[in-house]
Image (spheres, helix red, strand yellow):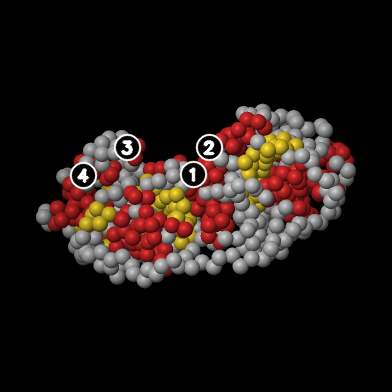
Amino acid sequence: MTAIAPTSGSGLRAVAELAAQLRIDSIRASTSAGSGHPTSSMSAADLVAALITRHLHYDWDQPRLPDNDHLVFSKGHASPLLYAMFKAVGVIDDNELMTGYRRLGQRLQGHPTPVLPWVDVATGSLGQGLPAGVGMALAGKYLDRRPYRVWVLCGDSETAEGSIWEALDKAAHYHLSNLVAIVDVNRLGQRGETELGWNLDAYARRAEAFGARAIAVDGHDLEAIDGALSAAESPPDGRPTVILARTVKGKGFSEVENSPDWHGKPLPPDMAARAIAELGGERRVIIRGPRPARTAGRAPVLSRSHAWWPRYAVGESVATRKAYGDALLALGGRDPRVVALDGEVSNSTYADEFARAFPERYFEMFIAEQQMVAAATGLAVRGYRPFASTFAAFLTRAHDFIRMGAISGVDLCLVGSHAGVEIGADGPSQMALEDIAMLRAVHGSTVLYPSDATSAAALTNTMATTSGISYLRVTRGAYPVLYPHDETFPIGRAKTLRAGDDDQVTLVGAGVTVHECLRAADMLAERHIAARVIDCYSVKPIDRATLAAATATTGGRIVVVEDHRPEGGLGSAVTESLLADGITDLQVAHLAVRGMPGSGSGAELLAWAAVDAPHIASAARRLITGRE
């Protein structure tokens, strides 16, 4: 751990005045709103005042300037401080601060979101700002080659989150000396003392164990803070820096300082008036810090030309995960903004094809799925198009990061392989059976589940230009190619693979169950039962028109089959669509994985789950005849 001695106090008077104003405005805004976290803001006011006045290189009039530093409030509950800072630099006025904070329809929300142009990512779900900062720092060091720095203000409570340590681990692995975490160690969390309290030595040992450089500082000594920030700007090696600032919650108002009783509570008007008086009264400081130096950066270039696009012969057996890898490789040759991340399974997801061809645009996140999604979010902030892949089952642990990515409004392409019981002998811990439900519930998401290599490659290409969170579910096993290479797969549509005027039942599948539906249709045809087969490769949004037309033709008889839990997956999407269109005269058989699977072959497990062709055909016969 490095200790920083105080530096000259000259030039710090303005910082002290700004710090007092930030505390006062944090109190005023939260009292006006009737809610908020003023005491958590007051503890970090000196840190933020020193940072934005003397060290944050940022053009506030051009928030998208590529050379700007990034400032992420990982402790998003300190939003009064952030918005007070925005007032201090002149990008919002006092009226907005006092009438817009935490109000319906206003942009100064309870926790910051990118509805404000100076906010890069939504925070407030603790433990996420630093991991996203890793992605921004990766872009600066390896892709943009620009000298900007990523500053992340963290709370001490959030260091209990494993994601903080995943972030430091990956930051050290990638030598991100352009990343600085400033930890506001104010000792108190929501209900009392934090795990480590004010034990800065313990924090430092942990940070250093993960490969960071730790600097301890008195978080209310402006000279010491300034020295620590200067040291972070000139790291002696390639390590990220963690500034551990010992602070006092509620600093500046003696009635609440270091009290465990004032977390997340605005001061009543009478107390707020006393606090403002103790802090020396309201101020109208407007201050701008250093602007970034304009640099050329590195223009994105293609390291090699890939004019080709993968093609597969109809009938050829190809795994959709292999088609994803092929398409990602082709995309990498076409678009220099495409980057890839993986959770140490790239030889199974076939992201390794991209990694070999474009190593400078591939980031291995190892077994750290939260960090993988967060780094992808940070890369997206910098204008890149990240594709992040792992086994679909393991994306579930990153769900909160995906959810926050949607709130941030970033464009992420997520790919989950080895889905469903189809994977076979590995057993239930490896089987994604909840992933479609999880991703369908994310605001603005797109959920895709291709049945063959042609559709998988085409949908990978489409994801590269799709807004929001998009998810591609791919299968472990190899299955026959169903579509010619020039077939198109628009999002929100479906493919009708079998159809006739005398169809008696509709079979709806996605991914592996499409092949089972086709087999079931052949079995039904042997009994002179005509079945319509629909490939719902776009689960969200779903093709409402095709489903409605099919059920009208087949008298409302529909069998929906999915290698997924019955809740929230394809069956839910189909029935919700039909009901939304006012179609209620339905006879629905919903085949899904309802028990707890074990090991076995893929075929054995599809049969065990009753989602294979014989069970589909049996369900269809029951709908038509009332018996099997």
**Tag of residue 428:** 3
- What secondary structure is marked by label 1? helix
The tag earlier along the polypeptide, 1 or 4, is 1
Q: Amino acid at mark 2?
A: Gly
Q: Please indicate whether residue 463 sits to the left or right of residue 71 in the image.
A: left
The tag earlier along the polypeptide, 4 or 2, is 2
- What secondary structure is marked by label 2? helix
The tag earlier along the polypeptide, 1 or 3, is 1
Crowd tier of the residue under label 1, counting other residues whose Cα lies within 10 Å: few below 14, some 14–19, many 20 or above: many
Q: Please indicate whether residue 305 sits to the left or right of residue 153 in the image.
A: left
Residue at 65% over, 48% down = 235
Q: Amino acid at mark 3?
A: Pro
Picture quadrant where residue 157 is located:
top right
Mark 1 and mark 2 in contact (Cβ < 8 Å)?
yes
Given this view, does label 1 or label 4 mark the residue nearer the observer?
1
Mark 4 and mark 1 in contact (Cβ < 8 Å)?
no
Residue underneath mark 1 = 370
Residue underneath mark 2 = 162
Residue at 83% over, 48% down = 12
Residue underneath mark 4 = 603
Q: CA distance from mark 3 to mark 2?
A: 25 Å
